[in-house]
C-alpha cells in the first residue's frame, strides 16, 4: 500500500464517522465501522474525505474491490439512498 494513498487524518475519519453515524451502505450501527474506499484502491481510489465512508464488517467484506454501484445493485442494497447521502455528507464535510 503506497503511503501517498493514506492521507486521511484521524480528525477527518472522526468527522466522516460522525456524519454517517452508521454503515454507509446498509445503515448498520452495531459493531465496529471500518474505513471503506468507495472507489477501491485497486481502481485508483485513495483514502480521502471524498472517498472514504464507514462500512460494517459485512458490507466491507462483501464489497471488496467491486465497483460500488454495481455491487450495491447486485447485493440488493439501496444504491440511490447511498449516493444521495454520500453527496450530502461530502458537501457537509467540505464546507466544515
Ligand atoms: Zn453495512
Image (tube, rainbow, N blue to C red):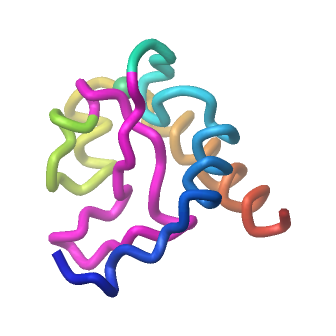
- Name the quadrant of the N terminus: bottom left
**Quadrant assignment, res 81:** top right
User: Which part of the image, by quadrant, shows the C terminus?
Assistant: bottom right
Could you tell me which residue is drawn at 78 percent across and 56 percent down?
92
Identify the residue shown where x is 21% and y is 82%.
2
Q: Nearer the viewer, residue 54 or 13?
A: 13
27 and 34: which is toward the camera: 34
Residue 41 image position (x, y, % from top left) = 23, 69
Instruction: State which quadrant residue 32 falls in.
Output: top left
82 with respect to 65 (left or right)? right
Percent position of residue 91, x then y: 74, 61
Which residues lie in the magenta part?
32-59
**x and y percent of residue 47 in the render?**
40, 68
Direction from residue 37 to residue 83 in the image, left or right: right
The answer to which of 75 and 93 lies nearer the viewer is: 93
User: Does the magenta-highlighted stretch encompass residue 52?
Assistant: yes
- State which quadrant residue 84 falls in: top right
Q: Who's the residue at 50% across and 17% down the image?
A: 29
Q: Residue at x 33, y 64 (%)?
A: 39
Amino acid at each position: 500500500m503506497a503511503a501517498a494513498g493514506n492521507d486521511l487524518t484521524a480528525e477527518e475519519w472522526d468527522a466522516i464517522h460522525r456524519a454517517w453515524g452508521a454503515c454507509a451502505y446498509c445503515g448498520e450501527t452495531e459493531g465496529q465501522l471500518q474505513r471503506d474506499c468507495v472507489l477501491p484502491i485497486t481502481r485508483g481510489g485513495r483514502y480521502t474525505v471524498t472517498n472514504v465512508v464507514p462500512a460494517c464488517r459485512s458490507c466491507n467484506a462483501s464489497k471488496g474491490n467491486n465497483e460500488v454501484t454495481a455491487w450495491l445493485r447486485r447485493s440488493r442494497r439501496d444504491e440511490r439512498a447511498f449516493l444521495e447521502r454520500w453527496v450530502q455528507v461530502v458537501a457537509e464535510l467540505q464546507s466544515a
